[in-house]
């Protein structure tokens, strides 16, 4: 279908008949993908018992998923220059559906892991494409609101994951976590077949094999190394160093070849650079606290799995509401003050977790979680829109979306590994009983989101592109 691109500041970059329907399939697919990223955290103990596997082995259900996402994401920009929007989205949704069914029917760990990795391919394709299409089909006056909805998917899905998983596991087996994906994916496929229009041009650039290899090896090495570090310690960082060196080669090549897989020169844009950094820090706060909180409630407060999920429900609902509202607020106020306020609120919520004990009330945990779920999305959507709106061409928007989503996944892997390490250090140093020692470990781990919040706050007050933006 022929697209009309407009230069008018009051009209979308690409005109489509139904902008909302054009991104509906990607919104649903991305929601399922992000939900899948945290949904298994609360189910890991049951999976260990059901499949008779160790903690180190079961962790690969999370690590393997993130590993495949980390490999696919950097290649997304190249893929969308060779295949149309409809082709990529429909393939991604069918791929996720196949992976979900395989995982739901899996009789063994190896088949379950295979299903998870298939799902990772789909998430790596759908996440950045959702933001790219939203940037192209939204009118400038509504861009913040549209991006707020997209951000709501990214924020709400991992926040609500533990709640829904806890409710499922209270009555059903772990297989039903994956069966729950199926109806959403079928609905997304219906939207894709009936309403999705192609956005962007297929330039079909030359495929640079060296860039692909260095991208795959570099990102895979980093994700695997930090995942190993979370369980085996940070004493041996050879694989991480290797990954960094390979990625440095990859980055150098992208800057110097005529047709790069990913245009890293957009980092020269200070607004994009600042926004991307804010998104990374925010995502680190979210994933580290989402990792810490369920374990604290189960091992520090000795609450059952289902209760843990219910306790996290109010925060998930607030997260969704604030994510949507923050997009509209960006249209009126810009990113600067919203980001400052968001990170300040997130800092308060993180500090509250530092004051917990084995006797902390459920009400206090709910309040702390809700405060976190106000602050993080309040900063996330404006930061993301601030970054992507600074990139004017469709090609640079696609590269920017791919870069930010890739950095989010790496940040997620690193922040989870750091939180695990800090938790272990605090637990080992404590002289209390098992319950008290674990709570002490949680306190040590909470210093990570506190530090990330402080760093983000400082940057919002000192970075040039934020200070003079509004």
Image: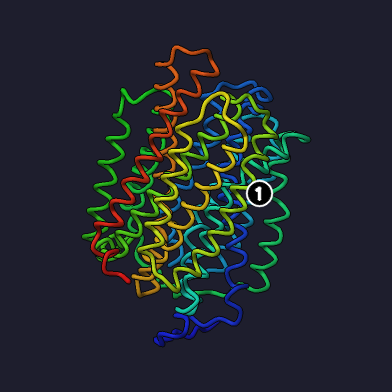
For the question of whether residue 133 can be seen, the reply is no
Tell me the residue at 47%/52% (across/down): 375
User: In which quadrant will I find the C terminus?
Assistant: bottom left
Q: Position of residue 117 (x, y in %)?
A: 55, 42
Which residue is identified by label 1? Answer: 98
Where is residue 206 shown, x and y percent of the image? 34, 64
Can residue 330 be seen here? The reply is yes
The location of residue 261, given as percent across then percent down, is 34, 60
Please rate how many residues cluster around mark 1, counting C-alpha atoms within 10 Å: few if below 14, some from 14 to 19, many from 20: some
Residue 233: x percent and y percent? 37, 23
Total numbered circles: 1
Q: What residue is drawn where x is 33% and y is 50%? A: 456
Q: Considering depth in this image, is 448 or 241 the residue closer to the camera?
A: 448
435 over 421 or under it: above or below: above
Q: Is residue 235 left or right of residue 49?
A: left
Is residue 189 shown left or right of residue 282? right
The vertical placement of 204 against 10, above or below, is: above
Q: Nearer the viewer, residue 125 or 302?
A: 302
Q: Residue at x 35, y 47 (%)?
A: 213
Task: Determine which quarter of the picture holds residue 114.
Answer: top right
């Amino acid at each position: 279908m022929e697209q009309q691109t407009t230069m008018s500041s009051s009209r979308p970059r690409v005109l489509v008949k139904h902008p909302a329907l054009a991104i509906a399939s990607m919104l649903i697919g991305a929601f399922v993908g992000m939900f899948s990223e945290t949904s298994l955290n609360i189910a890991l103990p049951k999976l260990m018992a059901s499949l008779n596997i160790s903690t180190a082995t079961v962790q690969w259900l999370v690590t393997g998923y993130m590993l495949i996402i980390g490999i696919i994401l950097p290649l997304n920009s190249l893929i969308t220059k060779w295949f149309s929007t409809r082709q990529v989205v429909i393939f991604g949704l069918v791929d996720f559906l196949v992976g979900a069914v395989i995982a739901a029917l899996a009789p063994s760990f190896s088949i379950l892991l295979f299903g998870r990795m298939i799902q990772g391919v789909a998430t790596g394709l759908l996440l950045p494409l959702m933001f790219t299409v939203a940037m192209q089909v939204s009118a400038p006056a509504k861009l913040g609101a549209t991006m707020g909805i997209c951000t709501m998917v990214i924020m709400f899905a991992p926040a609500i994951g533990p709640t829904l998983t806890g409710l499922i596991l209270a009555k059903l087996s772990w297989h039903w976590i994956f069966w729950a994906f199926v109806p959403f994916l079928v609905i997304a496929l219906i939207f894709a077949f009936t309403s999705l229009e192609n956005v962007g041009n297929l330039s079909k650039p030359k495929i640079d094999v060296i860039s692909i290899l260095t991208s795959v090896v570099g990102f895979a090495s980093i994700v695997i190394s930090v995942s190993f570090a979370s369980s085996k310690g940070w004493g041996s960082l050879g694989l991480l160093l290797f990954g960094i060196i390979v990625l440095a080669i990859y980055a150098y090549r992208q800057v110097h070849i005529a047709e790069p897989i990913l245009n890293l020169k957009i980092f020269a844009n200070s607004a994009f650079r600042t926004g991307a950094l804010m998104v990374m820090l925010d995502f680190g706060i979210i994933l580290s606290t989402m990792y810490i909180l369920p374990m604290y409630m189960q091992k520090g407060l000795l609450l059952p799995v289902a209760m843990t999920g219910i306790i996290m429900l109010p925060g998930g609902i607030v997260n969704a509401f604030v994510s949507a509202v923050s997009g509209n607020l960006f249209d009126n106020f810009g990113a600067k003050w919203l980001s400052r306020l968001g990170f300040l609120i997130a800092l308060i919520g993180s500090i509250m977790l530092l004051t917990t004990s084995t006797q902390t009330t459920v009400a206090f945990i709910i309040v702390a979680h809700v405060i976190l779920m106000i602050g993080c999305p309040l900063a996330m959507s404006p930061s993301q829109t601030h970054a992507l709106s600074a990139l004017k061409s469709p090609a640079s928007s696609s590269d920017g979306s791919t870069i930010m989503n890739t950095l989010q996944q790496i940040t997620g892997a690193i922040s989870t590994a750091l939180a695990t390490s800090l938790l272990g250090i605090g637990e080992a140093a404590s002289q209390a009983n098992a319950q008290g020692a674990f709570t002490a470990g949680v306190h040590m781990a909470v210093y990570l989101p506190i530090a990330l919040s402080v760093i983000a706050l400082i940057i919002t007050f000192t970075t040039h592109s934020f200070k003079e933006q509004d």
